[in-house]
Each structure stands twice: as structure tokens, then as C-alpha cells.
Amino acid sequence: MKSTIKDVARMANVSISTVSRVLNNPDIVVKDKRDKVLQAVKELNYSPNALAIGLIHKRTKTLGVLIPDISNLFYAEVIKGMEDAAHESGNNLIICNTDNNEERRLSSLKVLSEKQIDGIVFTSEPIFPDSYEVFKRLNIPIVLAATHSLEYDIPSVKVDDEQAAYDATDYLIKKGHTKIGMISGSMLDPISGLPRIQGFLRAHRAHNIELVPEDRIEYGKYLFEDSYKAMKALHTKFPEMTAVFATSDERALAAISYLHEHKVKIPDEVSVIGFDNTRMAGMCFPKLTTVAQPLYEMGSQAIKMLDSLINGVALDEMRSYMNHWIVERDSVKQFNQV
Amino acid sequence: MKSTIKDVARMANVSISTVSRVLNNPDIVVKDKRDKVLQAVKELNYSPNALAIGLIHKRTKTLGVLIPDISNLFYAEVIKGMEDAAHESGNNLIICNTDNNEERRLSSLKVLSEKQIDGIVFTSEPIFPDSYEVFKRLNIPIVLAATHSLEYDIPSVKVDDEQAAYDATDYLIKKGHTKIGMISGSMLDPISGLPRIQGFLRAHRAHNIELVPEDRIEYGKYLFEDSYKAMKALHTKFPEMTAVFATSDERALAAISYLHEHKVKIPDEVSVIGFDNTRMAGMCFPKLTTVAQPLYEMGSQAIKMLDSLINGVALDEMRSYMNHWIVERDSVKQFNQV
DNA sequence: GTGAAAGCGCTAACAT
DNA sequence: ATGTTAGCGCTTTCAC
């Protein structure tokens, strides 16, 4: 059996309040008793029961994290950033996989709430009115990571997807490409879909390149297989393409696979740029040029913001946008007109 | 403020025990009162405080998971398996990154214990005597995943690394290769080092291929950069090599990168086999032939075992070894003698 | 400076 | 069938 504060008190011949004091505010206890208590603590291998403390303080030092699909490599770095920041601020993380599933998301939220977590990080998924209602009812601090909401005032951290997509496209255009294909998330996806398409289009407009979007954009789910099919469709309908902008590294790898398998040289014949800069980007061949998101920092930043909120310190800004940048590796090449 | 059982009792005009009863054992309460309570619960949006319940039941339905480096892609699938199994059995996971760091591992274990988690899954790292002492003191069920201990009786799930390495090597030999290099973890690593080296050697012996281990094995840390250097060293000291056995997919990708960059054709000139079958194995080029570990199942199995232990049901076997198998993709080719 | 006692939100005897 | 009460392990008044 675990020893309790009572056991310590008994062994040290003091009251439980005294034990509590030496644990939380040692200076107000005379050295003599303090030492006896400390001795007993050690001897009994005592450590306080966080449930009891949480019950009193209404604070558990535990944070909830909702992630649509943990197995997605995108989250590896994000979670690490979260975990490090949590550790730093004395918090623990309960990570829940929502499986992109409304029911599971709701049930996770429910138990997290019952377990009296101090706050929640919600990742990647858009915020629909009913989710918002649930958040409000939970009545605890919440921050969004890799997603945001324009309708509701919920703090968030992410990159500026429209601008990042603009920059990726602009980069390709400045490299001499004018026939650029795109593998994108669905138009309805407010993160890796719509804004990135808009950025893609805006860059073309800025360079006076005309295009019919449907001819150059292919939509697909986020996983490899889907993206492979999307690449196939794209290459079929737009064979003149000299570069492709894939809106995630996984999509880019699918594009690369497709091109390799069809003996199309990368980047000599077709350049590929990805998005995310997951660790895979440096492990494939050719190494992937990609739009980097500060994944680790996004994770740690989300936790830091949440911790601030919990401690009642106001945030500088409701929606914070982190810098993105382009990591130049080997999958994009200057295109020389013929 | 969150509403409590008292609020519900007051609104429903019953005692708190009646409320407790309709929540835990509805049938023993007359329909009339039961309905009134349910109504109040709904109206107040009441949900029980898990801290209070945990304090009484000495059960939190929360499990701790220790992982050396969450950002390692190896864990993506493992964690998903754990999370799904945990969800299934009504548990939550507190995941702690230990950073391969003794101090952090200890401090995580300490808070997990204070938070009264019901059990622990410890992954990948070897069990040293002092860790074992800590585990014993914690006095809660623990299971090892992707690691095991021969000295101590701690339940574990993993594959048979020696046999898996044997099979990988045997596979290569049967494909006609006799000059096989190996990129391995350190000899001191009881998981991805020693046993896999032993399996590698045993397969050669079984086929009467003589070799000087130091000439064909290169050691490296588990990350890409290190493995790349290891591959470089290996290729330099063993240029006749026609195949390489990399003891993780990340190592294999490093080998592939090195070969690509040195214009060595894969698998035409050099074959590569990996280990793990992480999602990356299907995303690279050429697609990686690799020894598959059932990552997802290992995760879920670990949680299921832990849950059994917690519920007092004995395990069939202390050390359970899951099946491995070889996933044939495109990185290994029949070698024809010249 | 220290102990006694109330109370955090709940369950589980024990009464009735 | 239901209410009263003790108690889970702790912190925090309130006395002394």
C-alpha cells in the first residue's frame, strides 16, 4: 500500500497539517520537526496523492490533446514540442486520437472533462458550431494548433497557409516554372485545402500566368495512396507540367513515387515541392524541397499559450501565426525554357 | 462553475446517495425519482468528478506510457495501437517523452505515480537494476513494449529480434547474396543491437558463409544522419557488398540515400532490407523491402495486457513474442553470380 | 508554530 | 427504496 500523509504524521509524531506544511511551505515549520517529517517521508517513500490535491485546488496539472490521427507523421514533431513544453511547465499530456470521428471526439472530450484537466489543445480539425458549443460548455481554456477559427474567438497557433502556398508557388515560378500542377486537400478543408489553393492561385495572378484551376489542381485525402492516385490523375490531365506543389510531404512523396515509377526524372523533368517539412523530407530521394512549418515550436507554443491561459495571463494575440520558410533541398530545379 | 452531485440532488429533491445510485446502479431506484435525477443531470449538464471517484476507488482509468523519443516515426503506429486499445477499455493515456534521459524518466515516473495511474507501459529501453527498483517501488502493473527483460519477471511484448534478423539475412542469402553488409545499433543495445547481430551471424553460419564480423557490420545511433555515416563507412570498408541489412527503416532510408547519391542502383547493384515496416517503407523509392513488426498490434497488445493485469487476470505468458514477417517490396533483388 | 476540524466530490456501509 | 454518515488524502481556516 502507498503511504499517506497520516502515516508520515504518525511516524514523525506531528499532526498532518504539519506534514502538509513542510511539504508546501517548509520555512514556517521549526527545523526540528521539519527534519523529522522529511525523514519519515523518505523512510516511507511517501509522495502526495495528486487526486486529493486536485480535488481541493481544482487544478490537475494535466492537459488534454486531441489529434485526428496520431499515426500521421505530421504529429510526431508537434507532439514532441507539446510534451517538452508540458514537462517544462510541470504538466502532463493526455493524448486522445479522435480518428476524425465526431463520436469519439465527443466521448474523449467528456472523459477529459471528468478527469478535470486544466485545458485542451485541439489540433488540425475545423471548428464547427456544435464543436464550439461543446467547448463552451466545458468552460476550460482551449487552444487550437494547426487550425484556427475565424468565426469564434479561440486562441490558435498555425502558419499562414495562404501565404505559405503563395510562397511555394512563387518560388516555383521564380525558378522558371509556369506549368505547375497542385495536389491539394479538398476545397472544403479550411487548412490544407482552400487557403493553399488560394495562395497557389494568387501567386499565378501576381505573375500574370493564366490558368484554369480545374486543369491543374487535383484533390485527394491526406494519405499516400490517395495522393498517388491524385498525382496520376494530375499527370494524365496535365502532362506538360514541369513542377508540382504538393500540400503535404506525404502527398509530395506520393508524387515522387509516381514520377519515379514512370521514369520521370526529379527534378530534371519535373520538380516537386512539399509542405510541412516532416522528418521524412530529409530521408527520401531526392531530398524534398518543402515549405517548412515549425512543427515542434507549434506544439510547444500551443502548450505555452494554454498554460498562460490557465494561469490567467492574457495572450498577446488571439490568433498567432508562426513563420514558415522554404527548405531548399534537391527536388526542385531551375526550369529552362525550350 | 461545474455542478456537483449536491446540485443535482438539490434540484431533484433527493439525497446525494440517490443521485449516486441512478448514476451507478439505476435499477435500484424507483422510476419516478430516477427520472427526476436524470432530468436534473441533463439540465445542470452534470458529469461526475473523476478525481473524487478515483480517490475512493483507487483506480483512475489512466495509464502512463514512457517513450524514449516520440518524434521517432517508429512510435506513430505503436501509439495509435495503444490509444485505440485504451479507448476500447475505457482508459486514457498519459504519454511521457523520456528523451533517453534518466532524470526525466525518473521525474515522469514520479508524477505518474502521484497522479495515481493504474499502470505503466515502458517502451524500447533496456531495464537496468535501478529502473527495476523504481518499478518495484511504484508497485503498480507494468508492461514492456518493444523491449523485455530476461533478468526480471516483467511482462513484455515484442518480436523475436534474433530470429527476425536471422530471417532477414536468410532471405537475402536465399536471394543469392553472400556479401551482405549490416548497419546495426550498438552491440550494447539489447534490442536493435546485439540480438539482431546474432541473428545476422547465425544465418551466415547456417549457410556456411564465413565472415569477419567487423568487416561487414557498422554501428550507428538510430537517427538518419548517423546511419548515413555508418553506411558510408560500411560501403568504404566493404565495397564488394551486394546487399545491406539495415536494422531499422530509418537506417535503411539512410542507406538508400547514400546509394542514390553515389549512383549505385537499388536494387540492381545493391539490395537493401530494412526493419520495422513503418509507414515510410511504402513511401520511399524504391519501396522498401523490410522485416515487418506488427507495430499497431504491439501497442494495442501492450495496453490489453496491462489492462488485464490491472483487473487481476493473469497473463498467459510473461514474455510474449509477436510474429514478424518480411514485406517484399522493391529494394531487394535476386543476385546472379558473375 | 502547531493541531483540530471542515470540506473538496464522491461512494459505500449502515440505518430506517 | 432511500437518507445519513463516515471516509478516500489532502489543504486550509481557525484556535491556541
Image (cartoon, coloured by chain):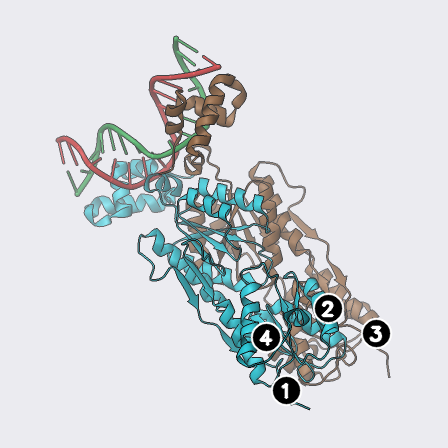
Chain colours: A brown, B cyan, C red, D green
Amino acid at circle 4: Gly
Answer few, some or many: residues within 10 Å of disc 2's Cα (few below 14, many 20 plus, some between 14 and 19).
Answer: some
Residues tagged 4 and 1 counted as in contact (Cβ below 8 A): no
Q: Position of residue A31 (x, y in %)?
A: 51, 18
- Quadrant for the C terminus of chain A, please: bottom right
Query: In the image, what residue occupies the spot 37% across and 57% down?
Result: B89
Answer few, some or many: residues within 10 Å of disc 4's Cα (few below 14, many 20 plus, some between 14 and 19).
Answer: many
Mark toward the start of the polypeptide (2 vs 4) = 2
Query: In the image, what residue occupies the spot 83% across and 77% down?
Result: A335
| Alpha carbon distance from label 2 to label 4 | 26 Å
Q: Which residue is mark 3?
A: A334
| Alpha carbon distance from label 2 to label 3 | 33 Å
Amino acid at circle 2: Ala
Q: Chain of mark 2?
A: B
Q: Are marks 2 and 1 on the same chain?
A: yes
Answer few, some or many: residues within 10 Å of disc 1's Cα (few below 14, many 20 plus, some between 14 and 19).
Answer: many
In the picture shown, does residue B109 fall above or below A200? Answer: above
Q: Chain of mark 3?
A: A
Q: Secondary structure at mark 1?
A: loop
Q: Secondary structure at mark 4?
A: helix
Mark toward the start of the polypeptide (4 vs 1) = 4
Amino acid at circle 1: Phe
Q: Which residue is mark 4?
A: B282
Q: Describe residue A105's horizontal placement relative to residue A151 as left or right.
A: left
Amino acid at circle 3: Gln
Residues tagged 2 and 3 counted as in contact (Cβ below 8 A): no
Residues tagged 3 and 4 counted as in contact (Cβ below 8 A): no
